[in-house]
Amino acid sequence: MEIDGKIILDLGMQSGISKAGNQWKKKEWVLETFGQYPKKVKFHVFGDKADTMNIEVGNSYTLSVDVESREFNDRWYTDISCYAVRPYVPGGVPPQGAYPQQGYPQQGYPQQPYAPQQTYAPQAAAPQPYAPQAAPQPFGGDAFPPAPTPDGYDAGDSTDDLPF
């Protein structure tokens, strides 16, 4: 999933030691999405990528993220983990080489915008096994019955006292 927006807050680096005795670290930011109703999204970068991603407050980026929810003590928590980042370009992916690779890991990104591998030519209409028949039209072939007169009666039939 990709999210576009502007970084509004750097929440800093966190680190620790897991139950297995391994060191871990993560860095968190808050991004504000673009649009009529902007949303604030807190995300993190985990592990060695936290040191290599050059994300600065005030700049706009396109983030590739994984969203995952988990339950703990009958409460649900959602984590948004960023695995790739690139500068935001309105309208889509910038051409290859438009920005430096250094500081912006590109793992998981295609270098060019998606394009189908095969183009499809329009197909000729398949022959119909039968031709559709015109439905019989009521009221002498008109699609609608005659309109009522201002006094509410059909002028063509004086014995009919119905208003329609």
Image (tube, rainbow, N blue to C red):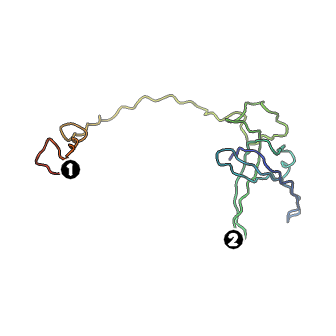
Which residue is rendered at x = 86% and y = 55% of the image? 25
User: Left or right: where does residue 161 sit relative to residue 93?
Assistant: left
- Identify the disc placed on residue 74: 2
Mark 2 or 1 closer to N-term? 2
Look at 34% across and 34% down and name the residue there: 128
Q: Would you place residue 124 above or below residue 147 in this image?
A: above
* Whether residue 8 is situated above or below residue 135 in the rendered picture: below
Q: How many marks?
A: 2
Within 10 Å of the Cα at label 2, are there few (<14), some (14-19), or many (20+) other Cα atoms? few
What residue does disc 1 label? 163
Nearest the viewer among 101 and 164 is 164
Residue 127 placement, left or right of 161: right
The residue lying toward the viewer, choosing from 94 and 155, is: 155
Secondary structure beneath disc 1?
Answer: loop
Nearer mark to the viewer, of 2 and 1: 1
Q: Which mark is residue 138?
A: none
Q: Where in the figure is residue 139, as x and y percent of width and height? A: 19, 40
Under mark 1, the amino acid is: Pro
